[in-house]
Amino acid sequence: MASTRTQSIEQTLTIIKPDAVAQNMIGNIIEYFEREGLSLVAAKMTHLKESDAERFYAIHKERAFFRELVEFMTSGPVLILVFQGDNAVVRVREIMGATDPAKAAPGTIRADFATSIDRNAIHGSDSLKTAKSEIEFFFTPQEIFSRTQG
């Protein structure tokens, strides 16, 4: 029986967080996405400045965990990635697993690499609208590359 899901090529942002970078899990995490048919179209390693982390996570500014999140995200280098593929936003979130690794499905990134809800290895855009703004926060259009030859 043919799938009724509509194909939609999308781009979405992920950030491999300081905990997973420090554990040398970058290649392992990228492999999860690539083996599911998503293409890496942009990558940038950086050490976020406090002001950048505060702006990026501004949506959480009123939440109790905001300051701790900013401190964590500036505690070491991160790898910022853009993946592209069919329904990329939803698929990346499925591959990442639940925010709380104790609740993440076996075989997901967070189940396999995260150590706690606060040190959960990876960030991923939660919607197409968020993905667009998050990608624009970190990348110019010239820094995103098609994976097709020609």
Image: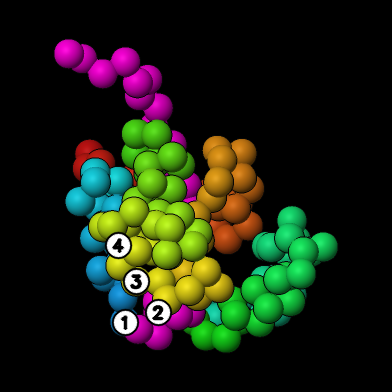
Name the N-terminal-most of marks 4 and 2. 2
Q: Is residue 59 magenta?
A: no
Q: Quadrant of the N terminus?
A: top left
Amino acid carrying label 4: it is: Ile
Q: Is residue 82 left or right of residue 139?
A: left
Name the N-terminal-most of marks 1 and 3. 1
Asked whether disc 4 touches disc 3, contact meaning CB atoms under 8 Å apart, the reply is no
In magenta, the rendered stretch is: 1-23
Q: Residues within 10 Å of mark 1 (few under 14, many from 20)?
A: few
Amino acid carrying label 1: it is: Asn
Q: Residues within 10 Å of mark 2 (few under 14, many from 20)?
A: many
| Vertical arrangement, residue 76 with respect to residue 34, above or below | below
Q: Quadrant of residue 7?
A: top left
Badge 2 element: helix
- Using the numbered discs, state the Cα–Cα distance from disc 4 to disc 2 in whole angstroms: 12 Å
| Vertical arrangement, residue 127 with respect to residue 68, above or below | above
- Residue at the farthest right position: 62
Residue shown at 52%/85% (left/top)?
A: 76
| Vertical arrangement, residue 22 with respect to residue 63, above or below | below
- Using the numbered discs, state the Cα–Cα distance from disc 4 to disc 1 in whole angstroms: 12 Å
Name the N-terminal-most of marks 4 and 3. 4
* Relative image position of residue 123 (x, y in whole percent): 50, 61
Q: Nearer the viewer, mark 2 or mark 3?
A: 3
Q: Which mark is residue 21?
A: 2
Q: Residues within 10 Å of mark 4 (few under 14, many from 20)?
A: some
Q: Which residue is mark 1?
A: 24
Asked whether disc 2 touches disc 3, contact meaning CB atoms under 8 Å apart, the reply is no
Badge 3 element: helix
Asked whether disc 1 touches disc 2, contact meaning CB atoms under 8 Å apart, the reply is yes
